[in-house]
Image: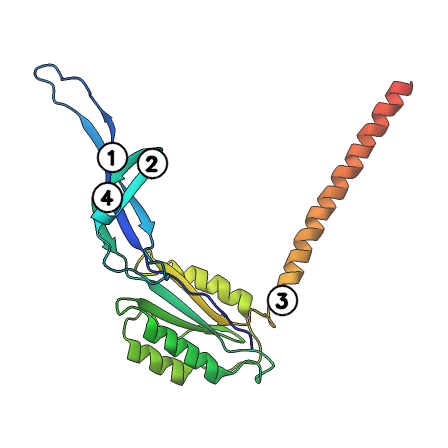
Amino acid sequence: MNKIICFFTLFFTLFFAFSLACYAQTPPDGEAEKITTEEIKINVSATDRAGKFVADVRKEDLVISEDGRLHQTSSIRLIAPSVLIALDTGGANRLAKNIVATRKIAGNLIAALAPSANIVVMQFHDNVEFLSDWKTDRNSLTRIIESRTNFGRRSSFIRAIAAANDFLATAPTENRHLILITDATDSRDDKEARGGNQKTFDRRHSRSRCRLRAARACRARAASQNTS
């Protein structure tokens, strides 16, 4: 099947400080000079011309331009990624969705991630299930994928996206990424979603009809008054 795999890039967090307000003139005797500074955090990704991640970036390598003013970074640090891998293991067509291939893709992704990466594994079929908590142990995660993933009759893609979004809020770092191994079809929630959207449309359409009837009534009264 055609799988959608969302990849990511690691990023650095830069810090730079700039003066918000200061006294330019020499303060009178007995008054201390006041300077207010603020530290700003900026997340950036660093890649070479070939698109490969650069891990040895120094603060001296970067300059920040703000409204024509240049700022030098005061510090830089690498943020470990928090990666949620969501495996689609559901659907009626098991020939198209091969769970062996899905497991292999997930295993290769885990092996390719940085050693510092925090990883959690989720599968979705008839239900959404988190198979682990945040871990850095690659061997443990690989065993979980091989032993605990199973195939279901349906694919709960919509629910999986919502659950993944909520779970990413618990990530140990702010460098959060979601990787989906799926064909992006939903065989469970599509009717429910369409039903919910239809109800919302009906309510909005009903309000629109009411406003239209009210507007027509107002115009009719105005026209009657003008003719009289």
Relative side of 137 to 89, left or right: left
Looking at marks 4 and 2 on the same chain, the residue that comes earlier in the sequence is marked by 2
Judging from the image, what secondary structure is the residue with disc 1 in? Answer: strand
Mark 2 highlights which residue? 66
**Callout 3 amino acid:** Asp
Mark 4 highlights which residue? 73
Residue closest to the eye, 222 or 75: 75
Q: Residues within 10 Å of mark 4 (few under 14, many from 20)?
A: many
Q: In the rendered image of this protein, does residue 60 appear above or below residue 25?
A: below
Q: CA distance from mark 4 to mark 3?
A: 48 Å
**Callout 2 amino acid:** Glu
Q: CA distance from mark 4 to mark 2?
A: 12 Å
Residue located farthest toward the right when viewing the structure as drawn? 228
Looking at marks 3 and 2 on the same chain, the residue that comes earlier in the sequence is marked by 2
Looking at marks 4 and 3 on the same chain, the residue that comes earlier in the sequence is marked by 4
Mark 3 highlights which residue? 190
Looking at marks 1 and 4 on the same chain, the residue that comes earlier in the sequence is marked by 1
Judging from the image, what secondary structure is the residue with disc 4 in? Answer: loop
Q: In the rendered image of this protein, does residue 136 appear above or below residue 147?
A: above
Looking at marks 2 and 1 on the same chain, the residue that comes earlier in the sequence is marked by 1
Question: Can residue 150 be seen in this snapshot?
Answer: no
Judging from the image, what secondary structure is the residue with disc 2 in? Answer: strand
**Callout 1 amino acid:** Phe
Front position among marks 4 and 3: 4
Residue at x-position 43% and y-position 72%: 122
Question: Can residue 154 be seen in this snapshot?
Answer: yes
Mark 1 highlights which residue? 18
Q: CA distance from mark 1 to mark 3?
A: 51 Å
